[in-house]
Image (spheres, rainbow, N blue to C red):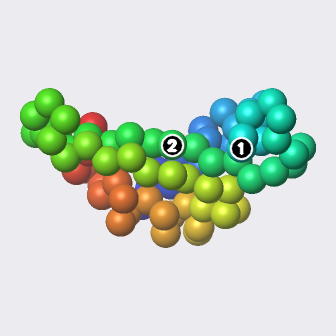
Amino acid sequence: YEAAADFRAFNLGSMADQQPAGGAGAREGGPRHRIWISKPKGGFNAIGIHMHSLGEADLASDEATRQWLPPRIPPGEVV
């Protein structure tokens, strides 16, 4: 999955100043995650849309991200 390193870099950069999970009252340094919504090519309205949670462990390395992506977002199958 060639895009894994760019996908990881984008997520790490956008999470840099994100508050810990739970909002303002959460413990500093708590786990953070991103929610991604994917829509398959050729999908109509909301048919086929999925929500995926991307946790810090999935961003720990390029390899972890490379393993997370394909089962959820197959190459060339989503917009």
Q: Residue at x 43, y 51 (%)?
A: 52
Q: Is 39 drawn above or below residue 60 in the view shown?
A: above
Question: SS of the residue at dot 1?
Answer: loop
Q: Position of residue 46 (x, y in %)?
A: 19, 35
Q: 10 Å neighbourhood of mark 2: few (<14), some, or many (≥20)? A: few
For the view shown, which residue lies furthest in the front direction? 25
Please name which of the two marks, 2 or 1, marks the residue nearer to the observer: 1
Specify whether 73 is left or right of 11: left
Residue 21 found in image quarter: top right
Q: Earlier in the sequence, mark 2 or mark 1?
A: 1
- The Cα–Cα distance between marks 2 and 1, rounded to whole angstroms, is 12 Å
Question: SS of the residue at dot 2?
Answer: strand
Q: Position of residue 40 (x, y in %)?
A: 21, 44
Point out the image quarter for the C terminus: top left
Q: Position of residue 18 (x, y in %)?
A: 74, 33
Say the numbered circle drawn on residue 44: none
Residue 24 found in image quarter: top right
The reply to whether discs 2 and 1 touch (Cβ–Cβ < 8 Å) is: no
Q: Is 22 drawn above or below residue 5 in the view shown?
A: above
Q: Residue at x 83, y 35 (%)?
A: 25
- Residue 6 visible (yes or no): no
- Residue 69 visible (yes or no): yes
List the residue tagged with mark 1. Answer: 21
List the residue tagged with mark 2. Answer: 35
At label 2, the amino acid type is Ile
At label 1, the amino acid type is Ala
Specify whether 40 is left or right of 66: left
Q: Residue at x 33, y 43 (%)?
A: 38
Q: Position of residue 54 (x, y in %)?
A: 55, 53
Q: Residue at x 62, y 56 (%)?
A: 55
Q: 10 Å neighbourhood of mark 1: few (<14), some, or many (≥20)? A: some
Point out the image quarter for the N terminus: bottom left
